[in-house]
């Protein structure tokens, strides 16, 4: 996948996260590609992580069953985009 497609995927992912987690006060521009999604960064919690796993399944056909795997994937936008590019089925 080329750089342009990767950037488009990251922007799409940011929009999906904002919509799926219902955080309308945030825009895609507010989320840095390397900003942690949990804790100090975007401040998501464990319920949000479950929602993001559902998002990955629904939008990209990715099934994550192991929470440890989920923690490795849901680090930041860069990590999620890289994982999607390698594992997507949709």
Image: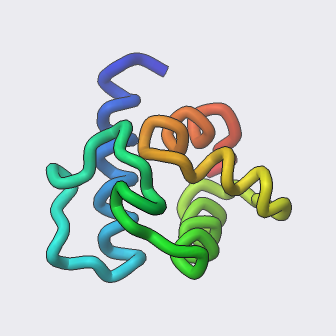
Give the quadrant of residue 68: bottom right
Position of 82 with respect to 6 (left or right) is right
How far from the left and from the top, in percent, is residue 14?
33, 55
Residue in the picture at 35% in, 45% down: 35
On the image, the x and y values in percent for residue 85 come to: 58, 34
Task: Pick out the residue farthest to the front.
Answer: 40
- Residue visible at 19% across and 68% down in the picture: 26
Residue 36: x and y, percent?
Answer: 42, 49
* Picture colour scheme: rainbow
Residue 59 occupies which quadrant of the picture?
bottom right
Q: Is residue 52 above or below residue 3?
A: below
Q: Please give left or right for residue 61 compared with residue 49 in the image.
A: right
At which x and y percent is residue 55? 55, 68
Q: Nearer the viewer, residue 60 or 37?
A: 37
- Residue beneath the point at 41% across and 17% down: 2
- Figure check: 10 above or below 49: above
Q: Residue at x 38, y 67 (%)?
A: 43
Picture quadrant of residue 10: top left
Report how many numbered discs are placed on residues in the image. Answer: 0
Q: Nearer the viewer, residue 72 or 8?
A: 72
């Amino acid at each position: 996948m080329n750089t342009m497609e990767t950037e488009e995927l990251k922007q799409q992912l940011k929009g999906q996260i904002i919509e799926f987690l219902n955080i309308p006060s945030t825009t895609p521009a507010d989320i840095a590609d390397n900003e942690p999604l949990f804790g100090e960064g975007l401040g998501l919690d464990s319920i949000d992580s479950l929602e993001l796993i559902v998002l990955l399944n629904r939008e990209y056909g990715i099934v994550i069953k192991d929470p440890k795997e989920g923690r490795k994937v849901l680090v930041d936008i860069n990590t999620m985009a890289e994982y999607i590019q390698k594992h997507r089925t949709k």
